[in-house]
Image: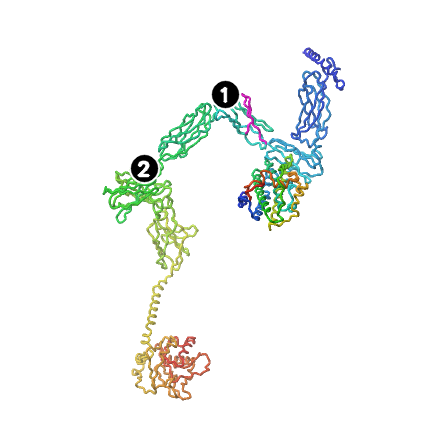
Amino acid sequence: MPDKLYVLNLIVAVIFYLPVRKIQASQVTQGVTSYGVLFGLSVLSEPLPLTPESLSVSINSAKQCLHLQWTVHNFGYHQELKMVFQIQISRFKASNVIWMENYRTTVTRNQVLHWSWESELPLECAIHFVRIRTMVDDARIPVPRFWSNWSSWEKADAQSSLGDHPLYVFPKDKLVEEGSDVTICYISRNHQDNISCYLEDVLTYGKQLDQSVRAFELKNVSFVRKTGTNFYCQGQGVTEGVVLFVSEVLEEPKDFSCETRDLKTLTCTWDPGDDTGLIQMPSYTLFESFSGKKTLCKHRNRCDWQVTQDSQEMYNFTLVAENYFRKRSVSILFNLVHGVHPVAPYNLFPKNVSATNATMTWKVHSIGNNSALLCQLQLLGEGKVIQQHNISVRVNGEYLLSELEPDTEYMARVHCAYADHFWKWSELISQNFTTAEAAPSEAPDVWRDVMFVSGHPTVTLFWKPLSKVHTHGKILSYNVVVENLDEPSSLEVLSVPAPANSTKVTLNQSSYQIHVTAHNSAGPSPASTVAISGHPGNENVEEGRINGTEDGFPMSWKPQSRNATGYVVEWCDGPQNLPCVPQWRNLGPTTTGTVISSGAFRPGVRYTFRIYEISTKRMARLLEKKTGYLEELAPSYNPQVVPNNLTSHSFTLSWKDYPTESQTGFIQGYYVYLKSKAGEKCHRGFEKTVLPDNSVCCKYTIDNPDQKTFVMKDLQPESVYEFLVTPYTSAGEGPLDDFRKVTTPDEYSHILIHIILPMIFCVLVIMIACYLKSQWLKDKCYPDIPDPYKSSVLSLIKSKENPHITIMNVNDCVPDAIEVVNKPEGSKIQFTGTRKSPTETKGTKPAYLDLLPTEKNYSGPGPCICFENFTYNQAASDLGYCGHFPVTPQAPHCQLGPLTSPENLLKTLEQNYMNSLGEIPAGEANLNYVSQLASPMSGDKESPPTNPPEPALCSEYKMQMAIPLGLASPPPSENSSLSSTTLLDPGEHYH
Amino acid sequence: MVLRLLLLCMVATGKCSGKYHELLLQLQRQADLMQNPSTLLDPYIHLQGLHNPVLKGSCMERPGDFPSEDALWRLSRQDFLRTLNTVLGLFLRMLSSLQQDLPKAAQQQAEMNIRGLGNNIHCMVQLLRGSSDPEAAEPTQPGPGPTPPPPPLPMLPSDTFKRKLRVCEFLQGYHRFMRRAGQVLRGWGGRRGRSRRHSPLRGLQRAARGTWPFPGLRRLAPQGQLPRLWSAPSPGFLGLGGWPGQVHTGPTFH
């Protein structure tokens, strides 16, 4: 084996010998180690010293690259050699090597070599130094090989061209992919500056690389906005920054597919994925490998490709998406006829549309050489496909649709596909049409309500609108034919325009059949017939109760006739107190039960159902009545309770006006609550209960809903009770918030009521009677001039002392003087003391006989004549109330002495009165008659007597007063004073 | 915003309104509307992510981008209207070159506002021209000459960050300029002929001498051409009728 290696080396040495010789000759002058001195085997161990020359370094700021360029000479006889170049890059200073790389390449003679290095640190922020050396790396050159000498350091200084701005930030407008790392640096000319740097709004800290350079490593940068991410520094009032354009990673196109619509143009589509976020969009290129053609797509998700005329059927497309950072591609193998997506048909129209048929026509776009298309015609009613037909079409399509419903709106739609190979339906086109009308197919559902007015039936006919399935067109009117069965020739026809659903017919007492038909523009419906008897049927059927459920009102009935043709259940949806539009349901002859449900049913409303049996003659007969609630509720309000018959131990409650039929449930009875403030024990029949407000009261249960009175007994007199009457249903009782108070009277109050009140009434009656008969009573009991014969004194005297004492007769006396008083009619003095006005008293002036001088015609002195009645008051006479005074011309007036003042008069009266009391026996002194002497004094009794009263000539006061015992000494009041003044008015005389 | 524009549209008629106060009020309202940063600047800041206080602080009006208030007050009414017209015309062109930088809706709305204001400026100029007020009267316009080339668009920095800030400054300047214009218009409020101008065509003369008072727009409008732009507007600007807010919907500039 060693022998073989030796031979091989020898061969190589021979091969290289001659060329080396030539190189030696040409390069001696260049001071390069010559291979020529190495000859024979020793030559093979020497390196091939090819030093790189003309090294130049340039800076590409946009890409942040150092670009190296150099050449290698002295290839000798070789046209090319494989070589390795070792490159060193230093930063800031030559000794600070930051990068070393071996670059291997095949070098041709006189080739200018290039090599680039991308710096992570912006090149503007640091001076870079580059050197290079080389070594032959060719198998033709025997080992060992040696590196050439290093080239001299080449300097790359981008800062020198920056200018004198105080602050710079690099790199400018760098484009990076999301998720990558970026290094940003700034150069500050003023080293003392305090510079703050921000990534967007975030303060960022970097690494000081040099006295004036600071670098910031941004890891995993993310997309912020299309207009770029701002990084900026601020120092000494200067703001500088850069914008990083971050691109999202370009996605591989998805769902790449191609199709043709006319076999002339292909359209390929794809989903490009998310936007990369750069203003510069990625490019999309479509390449077809069989034809070798490619096209630059105008859209980011679609590309058109013209089909060639050379009948190429298979296509191998490759879509290439490319941006600054990446290139993505997807491929598809496509058969042209397998991807035909026809254009939508057009001109879809209905023709010959009848009530049940319609013919649809449409056109299609031709494909290729008039290839056939498969079209699908769909018929939709109310949004659902109800018919579907496939038709082969070349140019014009046509299809007859049948089994359509009259007066119904349909939608016809059609789409087509390539018949030879189905790939995809075209877009749908649609057209609406409506079929013609036909006569209604079903008789209206008719019911009647019969009321007898004055013995004549008044029939209200109701009918339900026909369902759309049966109307077959717009109902225009309803015809009502009234047929009198007793008079076959009598027919009455009514036409009721739609949409009315009822009409009223007044009939006589015959039997009738009424036929109702619905009409549209195409004709009438079958007739619906009801029969009416001229006489009222039996409405008095027993009313049963039913309970509602969630499903409605279940009810059943017993058939009464074997030949019933059906049953009708009738009810009202609304509450009973509202006008009723009857609802009804027709049921078959074999049906004996049903469940009536309605959305209008509400809890707490009483519904009544009538069940009718329909005879063969269409006559309805009431079978049963049922009443119930869908759901019973507790009463919503309590009855208005009236308490009466109130005694000290009881009272009666009454609530007769409470209507039980209109309540929210069947009233089962009433609860009577009684609360007493004394907290008494509950009476018999009551039970103690606790109210929701935690108060305790007594409760009595009335389980008869018809009982509407209640007697509350065994109560305490003079006690306050609170009571409440509330009804209850199966759902509960009424509200407990309206207690009323009642107070029992004391035990004697009834006496007051029954005894004292009547007595008061009687007294009042007597007083009124006395008042009304006072004159009569006066005349009878105490006349102005009492009849001595009627005096009780007389009888008393007679009976006790001297039976012979008689009454003095005037005739028996010898009068000293006589005064005859002419007392006119109407001059009676009211004893009641009512003061008469001067005008009233004017006409009562007494008339005197001529023999007695009057004030006017008195012309001289004369005697005063005084008649006095001493019968009753002798003392007064003794006192000389009416003393006989000598009449002189100088003093013609009566000298009345101490009685000229009212005080004296009253005192005297009082004294006389007391005297008389002493003289009159007890028990007989009810009235004391005192004769008063009139004193013609004017003015107030309290005023000083400036003008001494002058007694009127021959005037006497004859009035007599009756002073009750209790009022013997009346206080001097204003009235009494006035009375005295009036009495003493001069010139007036009262009798 | 739409409602406000509709309200502004209420006075739109088939031709220029002859009512000075109505027209002036309309101009004031339009200026007030356009000075609101929410119409353009705020959407831009939001779209570009410049809402940080540090960056907002850097987004200040750059002197020279738009005429100062003092310069506006020095102009006669007709000069003021011409200047306003020209500045807005240039801004409109600037706006169309910022389609990638601005929200589309905000940009379109701003364009409509500017065109509406331009039409009302035209009507006001016509009204002032027909006025007998010697202060509002203008010298005879020079005869039609060759249509000047459109002014160059502003050179925005290629550095995206710098461009963002520069556009922000420019939009800020636009809103502030409209606020100043509104203040000047409100200063007209009293009588028709009142004028604070120091020299009727001082600004124009300065422009003609190469001392255009708005250096920031100098590159937008070549020296000596700015006044002519108003009388011969570039196609598509302020010559179209029917924009929101205009009182004038009839004649266009000729």
Real-space Cα distance between discs 1 and 2?
64 Å
Q: Disc number at residue A523? A: 2
Q: Can residue B183 be seen in this view?
A: no
Give yes or no for contact between labels 1 and 2 (Cβ–Cβ under 8 Å): no
Which chain is mark 1 on? A
Quadrant in the picture for residue B215:
top right
Q: Is residue A367 visible?
A: yes
Quadrant in the picture for residue A502:
top left
Q: Please tell me how crowded label 1 is: few (under 14), some (14-19), or many (20+) other residues with Cα within 10 Å.
A: few
Position of B75 compared to A529: left or right? right
In the rendered view, tell whether residue A959 sits above or below residue A861.
above
Q: Position of residue A700 (x, y in %)?
A: 37, 52
Position of A222 compared to A310: left or right? right
Say what secondary structure mark 2 lies in. Answer: strand
Total count of labels: 2
Identity, as a three-letter code, of the amino acid under mark 2:
Gly
Query: What's the magenta region?
Result: A280-298
Asked if the magenta segment contains residue A287, the reply would be: yes
Q: Please tell me how crowded label 2 is: few (under 14), some (14-19), or many (20+) other residues with Cα within 10 Å.
A: some
Q: Position of residue A635 (x, y in %)?
A: 38, 49
Q: Disc number at residue A311? A: 1
In the rendered view, tell whether residue A154 sits above or below residue A188.
above
Camera-nearest residue between A227 and A978: A227
Say what secondary structure mark 1 lies in. Answer: loop
Q: Quadrant of the C terminus of chain B?
A: top right
Q: Where is residue A707 in the image (x, y as percent from the top left)?
A: 33, 52
Asked if the magenta segment contains residue B57, the reply would be: no
Camera-nearest residue between B212 and B159: B212
Identity, as a three-letter code, of the amino acid under mark 1:
Ser
Q: In which quarter of the image is the N terminus of chain B?
A: top right
Mark 1 or mark 2: whose residue is earlier in sequence: 1
